Image: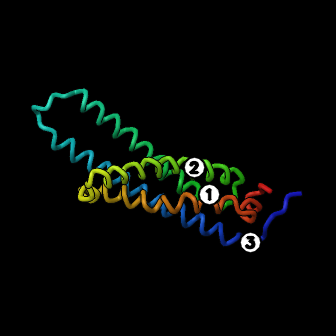
Amino acid sequence: MVYKMEQKPYLVYILIILWIVIGILFLGCLITYTTDYFDQLESRSDFHFDSKWDTMMDFSFAISFLLFLFIVVFSFLLVYWIFTRKSWAWLLGIMISSFLGLYIYSGIQSIGYLIIMDYFDRMFDTAYFTFQYVTYFVMIFFVPLLLIIFTRPQIKTYFGKT
């Protein structure tokens, strides 16, 4: 017998708010990264013929763009799926939260590099770097919070995972 809750637990609303904030942060990263990349494309001189470097930068842009787009789309889809109580949204939420842990790991490495090399002024060079580091700092707190909330008994019951 599956117990169905009549009312959403308050932690569901906290999950929804966290995923909306994550979506907005990564949307900001996506927009600023794309505009910075197109600004770099415009600033490339006609005499610059290093095609390997250009190919690597184009590939790096494509991978980062797809990664940010994936996170933005799935964070807003998760908001809808959590609100409508899709049972598989629980598993997807845990999987994407864990995946974002890898993003935090790269962020900690990047922040460590700034500390070791004393390049704190680079943290605010462009709008993308600013958004990126703000996202790193916020995600350091959000990802463990998401994983804790997803494993609470009332959330598991809400999704029918008891």
Asked which secondary structure carries label 3, the reply is: loop
Residue 159 lies left or right of residue 22; in this view the side is right
**Amino acid of disc 2:** Ser
The vertical placement of 132 against 12, above or below, is above
Instruction: Name the one closer to the observer, 78 or 51.
Output: 51
Q: Categorize mark 2 by other alpha carbons within 10 Å: few (<14), some (14-19), many (20+).
A: some
Q: x, y percentage for residue 107?
A: 41, 51
Task: Name the N-terminal-most of marks 2 and 3.
Answer: 3
Figure colour scheme:
rainbow
Q: x, y percentage for residue 36?
A: 26, 49
Residue 48 lies left or right of residue 77; in this view the side is left
* Residue that carries the numbered disc 2 in the rendered image: 98
Distance CA(mark 1)–CA(mark 2): 8 Å
Q: x, y percentage for residue 23?
A: 48, 58
* Residue that carries the numbered disc 1 in the rendered image: 147
Task: Name the N-terminal-most of marks 1 and 2.
Answer: 2
User: Residue drawn at (25%, 54%), measured in percent from left and top?
Assistant: 119
Asked which secondary structure carries label 2, the reply is: helix
Residue furthest to the right in view is 1
Task: Name the N-terminal-most of marks 1 and 3.
Answer: 3
Q: Of circles 1 and 3, which is in front?
A: 1
**Amino acid of disc 3:** Gln
* Residue that carries the numbered disc 3 in the rendered image: 7
Distance CA(mark 1)–CA(mark 3): 22 Å
Distance CA(mark 2)–CA(mark 3): 28 Å
